[in-house]
Amino acid sequence: MSAAHATAPGSRLLSVEEARAAVLAAVPGPTEPEIAYLSEALGRVLAEPVISTTALPPWDNSAMDGYAIRAADVDAATEDVPVRLEVIGDVAAGRAPDVEVRRGTAVRIATGAPVPAGATAVVPVEATTPLAADGAAGPRGRDATGPLPAGCLVHEAVPAGGSIRKAGSDLARGVTVLEAGRTLSAQAVALAAGAGVPQLTVHRRPRVAVLATGDEVVPAGQELGPAGIPDANGPGVAALVADAGAEPQALGIAKDRLEDVDSRLCAALAGGADAIVVSGGVSVGPYDVVKLAFEKVGRIDVWRVAVQPGKPFAFGTAERPDGGTALLFGLPGNPVSSFVTFELFVRPAIRALAGHPADRLLRPVDRAVLLEPVSKSPGRRGFVRVVAERAADGSPDRDEAGRVRIHLAGGQSGQGSHMISALAAADGLAVIPEADHRLEAGAAVELWWLGAG
Ligand code: AMP
Ligand code: MG
């Protein structure tokens, strides 16, 4: 028996935390590891650490275009009394040096080229003047291209090691550069590549099947007839699934008939779904067949969670034909309710399946201040859709206490659980504690940013 069933007696009102803990306890663990090329690694979670196959830089190299020299040779150099050096060679990026810097000599060097033996510093070209074979001075600090000058004047002293990037100063070879459990950001992809690693071991993206239900629900763009409504949840929940890092699999729109829902659930289980998210049809109305269909394929509880919006919410598990476990989620049909319950319960479960560590499952939380009053039912935690005030540069506007100044998206009337327009305008969800049925303007609240983390 799964923890979900052990901890979620049907009749009691569950807190958000209890419900989420029960969902997470039923997650069978992260998906198995697979190999991903760097080009497909963004957003994935590492199943194994990344070990550098090279030191970085691999060899001492020049941080500047200039001349590789012996720092001691130019100790006394000043703007007016420069030191003259003989230029004995050139080293371009991608070339190995073929000369050694000896006393009184310099080797012209490009940024990123290996520092030749004997050199202890690089003097930037800006601090030099090129000299022709007859001793004629060229333009001071001209760019370091063109024919190699016979000599150069150095107009300033440079410290030993100056403008040299030491081998291994960024990374050592054979060290862990990214830990298992890390999410691969663009920077992390660059680091893996820079460390010489072309393929990574990541968790498979969870497969999450998405089903809309309802005789009135019609695919967007099709004739609605006298009683139809466009399917907002199918595409919306699939987008939430993708945004959570999983691979959505569309199961279409089922009629409010047990066989129709059941056959689509069976198809999803046969297809290896790690989770199935159904919207609509979980209430106790005569046409609400989702619970029955879930009971046919697995075990399910309809929970009463102290959250608004978010009723009703069903959760359970089913065994797949391949022996694996699929999580079953039944979300309310109202689009805002399905969105909020997805945020609270489905997204953390998907992130756990995708391999994110336990402390990385939830949205980042911020502090905010309400700029207008808000009401909700007492006894339930409210998640109201809010818009942040913005400064001229587009960043969220904060008060003196550092709290984000927020408005209700669509005003109080935008808080209806069918109001997709206000949902789409929202930057985040503000959390209204269970005990409050009304908060006044100026009240401090928690803010969950959407679209980040
Ligand atoms: P239900 O949970 O099936 O009782 O549905 C509750 C409300 O949500 C009803 O007004 C439905 O028409 C609406 N609804 C259900 N599914 C969808 C959907 N996929 N897209 C838009 N609205 C929906
Ligand atoms: Mg329905």
Image (spheres, rainbow, N blue to C red):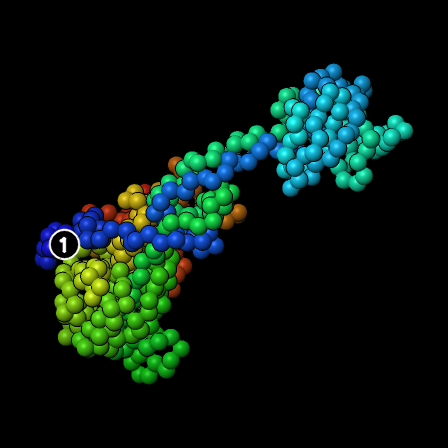
In-image side of 253 versus 150 (left or right): left
Quadrant containing the N terminus in the rendered view = bottom left
Q: Which residue is mark 1?
A: 2
Relative to 409, say whether 135 is above or below.
above
Relative to 422, say whether 403 is above or below.
above
Whether residue 430 can be seen here: no
- The percent coordinates of residue 25 (x first, y second) are 19, 50
- The percent coordinates of residue 140 (x first, y second) are 81, 31
Q: Between 41 and 208, which is closer to the camera in this rendering? A: 41
Amino acid on which disc 1 is placed: Ser
- The percent coordinates of residue 398 (x first, y second) are 43, 42
User: Does mark 1 have its CB less than 8 Å from ligand 1?
Assistant: no
Identify the residue at horizontal 68%, vertical 34% (top origin).
97
Other residues around mark 1 within 10 Å, as few (<14) / some (14–19) / many (≥20)? some
Whether residue 355 can be seen here: yes
- The percent coordinates of residue 240 (x first, y second) are 35, 60
Helix, strand or loop under label 1: loop
In-image side of 396 versus 227 (left or right): right
Relative to 262, say whether 157 is above or below.
above
Outermost residue toward the front in this view: 98
Identify the residue at horizontal 14%, vertical 75% (top origin).
286
Q: Between 119 and 144, which is closer to the camera in this rendering? A: 119
Q: Quadrant of residue 366?
A: top left
Identify the residue at horizontal 47%, vertical 35% (top origin).
173
